[in-house]
Image (cartoon, rainbow, N blue to C red):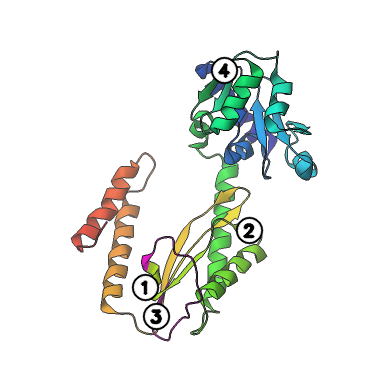
Amino acid sequence: MNDRALRNRQKKVREGMSRAGADCLIVTRPANVTYITGFLGDDSWAIVLPRAVILITDSRYSEQAAKECKKCRIVVRRNSMIKTVVKLLKNKVRKIGIEKSATIFDFEGLKKELKLRVKPIANIIEAVRQIKDDGEIAAIKAASKIASLAIKNTISRIRAGMTENELAGLLDFEIRKLGGQIGFDTIAAFGPNAARPHHRPTDRKLRKNDTILIDFGARYRGYTCDITRCFTTGKAGSLYNKVYNAVSEAQEAALKIVRAGAKIKNVDLAARSVLEKYKLPV
């Protein structure tokens, strides 16, 4: 992430803090910590102040943080997260905001230790994140490219007799070979198992005439794409062909109205209308 983009993000977040009446914002949500600091590690918080951003992490990530967060003050905690925040803020700020998504334990602990009013604030960083900057768009495109190449490389290795677990493992390996991370648990479902939206791969083997559903995502620099693909081995049944054609037509209908300024609900309605025409559940 370049320094200019990071400074711009921090400026917009501070504007949101000002509107919410907060001198500082304690950021606990991992995705928001990454957004405001550039840090890609785990178990870390950030504090946004009027003239500085502090990343609080532990010794496991000190080297990584130094490399990724050149525009932040890095504090390597030796104590609990709450006690570290209290030490940094006590008697220095009076109007403290904390992300509303923080746990009750963290919220109550900070309020007790700081002996100040700690105000839960929602959507300060999320509001800024709604509009993606060039760096975010580039990361999303990179994640999608990795996923596209990974599934292409995996398809050629699909064989009757392999298990769902084997297929999921092959795809995960391809994503990693291409420089990505696994965005979420990969779903590989054969035959009727595809009816389960969050199916966990099993030792069920692929048959000569069978259907395959793969739902996966590649992650790159904190951004994850989400892709679902369906295939058949051998001859597809009539119902499968009907549903495939309906979904393809619904996708085309939705894409026709996707443009800057279009309402998401109208894009969704365009797709649903096609499925209803085919008398399919939506």
Query: Where residue 210 is drawn, which disc sits there?
Result: 3
Image position of 133 with respect to 96: above or below:
below
Give the x, y percent position of residue 103: 55, 34
Give the foreground label among 2 and 4.
4
Name the kind of residue labelled 2 in the image: Gly
Category of crowding for the residue at label 1, using alpha-carbon neighbours closer than 10 angstroms: few (below 14), some (14–19), many (at least 20): few
Task: Give the amino acid type for the residue marked by disc 3 in the picture.
Answer: Asp
Q: Nearer the viewer, mark 1 or mark 2?
A: 1
Binning the other alpha carbons within 10 Å of mark 2 as few (below 14), some (14 to 19) or many (20 upward) gives: many
Residue 180: mark: 2
Q: Name the residue under label 1.
A: 192
Report the predominant secondary structure element of the magenta stretch: loop
**Which residue range is magenta in the image?**
195-212
- Spatial CA span between label 4 and label 3: 58 Å
Badge count: 4
Amino acid marked by disc 4: Ala
Packing grade of label 4 (10 A; few <14, some 14-19, many >=20) is many
* Residue 13: image tag: none
Q: How far apart are marks 2 and 4 (CA)?
A: 37 Å
Q: What element carries label 4?
A: loop
Q: Taking 190 as reference, is 109 left or right?
A: right
